[in-house]
Amino acid sequence: MASNYYSFHTLATLLITPLVLGTLCVIFPFFCIFRIVLFLYRLVVNENMKGKVVLITGASSGIGEELFTGVKRALYKYGSPTHNLPPLLRSSTRLTSNFTTMASNYYSFHTLATLLITPLVLGTLCVIFPFFCIFRIVLFLYRLVVNENMKGKVVLITGASSGIGEELAYEYARRGSSIVIVARREEQLRKVAEKARSLGSPDVLSIRADVSNVDDCKRLVDQTVNHFGRLDHLVNNAGISSVCSINDVTDITTFTSVMDINFWGSVYPTYFAIPHLKKTRGKVFVNSSSVAILYPPSLSFYTASKAALIGFYETMRLELAPEISITIATLGFTDSEIIRGKHLKDGFLQVESELANVR
Ligand SMILES: NC(=O)c1ccc[n+]([C@@H]2O[C@H](COP(=O)([O-])OP(=O)(O)OC[C@H]3O[C@@H](n4cnc5c(N)ncnc54)[C@H](OP(=O)(O)O)[C@@H]3O)[C@@H](O)[C@H]2O)c1
């Protein structure tokens, strides 16, 4: 599985990426023209807001207030009496005083941005993209040849009881690293630990923990450092998927676990590991997903949690440099329990095909 994974990614970087980027460079200008035409059309043809009811949260100041101003103006223009508004809007009416200056600034800025800045930025991108693409390929080839020596280093991997995390544990083991494997299923972890030792890892520590629990995350970092005295790589891999259209949701609160595990389950261990990683000039790896930029239907909560990871760790990249470096993976389909049907459906963990040993 690991070698399939690497050959797929080599192929993707060497062939598919330039192909996709090249196609984008051709399509982008047309897309840009289409957006400008659509924007101009929408400037002229406005939705008739007469008699419609708008609910705006955060309307007591700033953008919310100005959006409301637009609505109020529409209502005034079409003569709707204010007392017909729902209570939220009625109270905001009192807070709104100046409804011309900021709103008109806002609209003229956006007109300018769409008409001038967008084509300028896209045009510049078309010129820069091919060079960026070449740079990425050269960097990728360089990294294929010059690997970090992992012998004697300590790696903590969350979600190592199956799938990608398990394979990463074996890959680190082959390179002579000591590893800490984390998940909720102890029996699975025991098997992974045995195999990792047989592949060459000098020491493997298994820790049963739930990454959505902040105390568990502190404990697993503390245990790692107490046992090995250092931490070099933190691999934030644990995750769950959820497959459900928003139309079929019966209890929205049951989906919070997706964010708790996928987002906070990466952020908590990172937070506690930072002081130790700074000492070793270590690395943080985070397993986002290609869905974070592709937005497939029925994966909204999963997509949001993975997109949040990109936002958070891109910021971390700046805040933690140069002591700690960050790698964000946006993988596509990879054979694992998630792909074989283990996911939240309508908020509950379900296994849609025969999977042994899955909770
Ligand atoms: N497979 C793909 O196509 C794909 C593509 C892009 C990204 N990813 C991401 O890759 C990561 C690994 O997924 P996978 O494909 O290898 O699926 P997987 O085989 O289901 O692995 C998920 C791992 O996360 C662990 N886990 C789940 N919830 C946990 C929790 N609350 N606390 C601790 N560990 C937890 C699971 O162990 P326990 O159940 O024993 O706790 C398991 O080891 C996920 O973040 C996933 O979103 C996968």
Image (cartoon, rainbow, N blue to C red):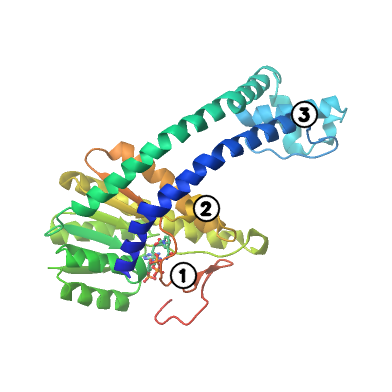
* Picture quarter with the C terminus: bottom left
Please say whether residue 283 is visible from this viewpoint: no
Q: Which amino acid lies under the numbered mark 2 shown in the image of this protein?
A: Leu
> Which of pointers 1 and 2 lies earlier in the amino acid sequence?
2
Question: Is the distance from the Cβ of mark 1 to the nearest ligand 1 atom less than 8 Å?
Answer: yes
Q: Secondary structure at mark 2?
A: helix
Q: Is residue 292 above or below residue 190?
A: above
Q: Secondary structure at mark 3?
A: helix
> Which of pointers 3 and 1 lies earlier in the amino acid sequence?
3
**Going by the image, does 172 lie left or right of 248?**
left
For marks 3 and 1, give the one nearer the viewer. Answer: 3
Residue 21, given in percent of the width and then of the height, sits at 46, 45
Q: Gap between marks 3 and 1, in whole Å?
A: 47 Å
Judging by the rendered image, the residue that carries numbered circle 2 is 294
Q: Gap between marks 1 and 2, in whole Å?
A: 17 Å
Residue 210, given in percent of the width and then of the height, sits at 37, 64
Residue at point 32% right, 41% down?
A: 135
Please say whether residue 254 is visible from this viewpoint: yes
Q: Which amino acid lies under the numbered mark 1 shown in the image of this protein?
A: Ile
Q: Is residue 72 above or below residue 52?
A: above
* Picture quarter with the N terminus: bottom left
Q: Secondary structure at mark 1?
A: loop
Residue at point 74% right, 34% down?
A: 89
Q: Is residue 312 above or below residue 212?
A: above
Residue at point 40% right, 58% down?
A: 331
- 77, 296: nearer the viewer: 296
Q: Gap between marks 3 and 2, in whole Å?
A: 31 Å
Residue at point 78% right, 33% down?
A: 46
Ligand 1, by image quadrant, is: bottom left
Q: Which mark is residue 44?
A: 3
> Which of pointers 3 and 2 lies earlier in the amino acid sequence?
3
Judging by the rendered image, the residue that carries numbered circle 1 is 339
